[in-house]
Amino acid sequence: MEDAGNTDRVQRHAILNNMIRKKIKVIDLFSGVGGLSYGFAHDDNFEIIAANEILPNMAKAYSLNHPSVKMYAEDIKDFSAERLERSRRSR
């Protein structure tokens, strides 16, 4: 009979492997110039899909540092999942 603990480990491992094959999507909130995104960008397990920064100069610097990431340079109160999804569908 198989050990229940071993079964749980195997299942967790399978879930993790599935997650890794599918890149984990990242949204960088309060992004500044993109230091957090820098780490994610150098790990093939992640895909940065958007960033949000209210300060225009910081948002511009972020976009220079991460040109492939959609920047929402606005107050986070105006940033919504629905808008993000609409933007992603229109690409």
Image (spheres, rainbow, N blue to C red):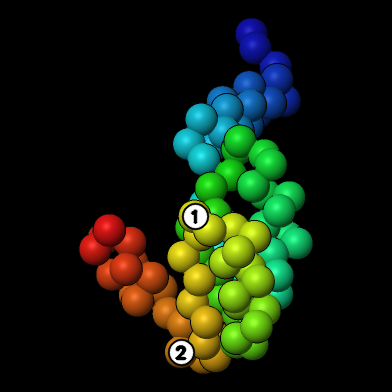
Element carrying mark 1:
loop
Element carrying mark 2:
helix
At x 70%, y 20%, the residue is 6
- Location of the C terminus by quadrant is bottom left
Q: Amino acid at mark 2?
A: Asp
Q: How many marks?
A: 2
Task: Say the numbered circle drawn on residue 68.
Answer: 1
At x 59%, y 58%, the residue is 66
Residue 90 percent across, percent down from the top left: 24, 63
Discs 1/2, front: 1
Question: Which image quadrant for residue 45?
Answer: top right
At x 68%, y 26%, the residue is 9
In front: 9, or 14?
14
In front: 55, or 48?
55
Q: Is residue 74 above or below residue 29?
A: below
Residue 3 percent across, percent down from the top left: 70, 17
In front: 19, or 11?
19
Task: Give the residue at mark 2.
Answer: 78
23 relative to 56 in the view: left or right: left
Neighbor class of circle 1 (other Cα within 10 Å; few <14, some 14-19, many 20+) is: few
Q: Amino acid at mark 1?
A: Ser
Residue 31 percent across, percent down from the top left: 66, 72
Q: Is residue 29 above or below residue 41?
A: below
Task: Say the numbered circle drawn on residue 76.
Answer: none
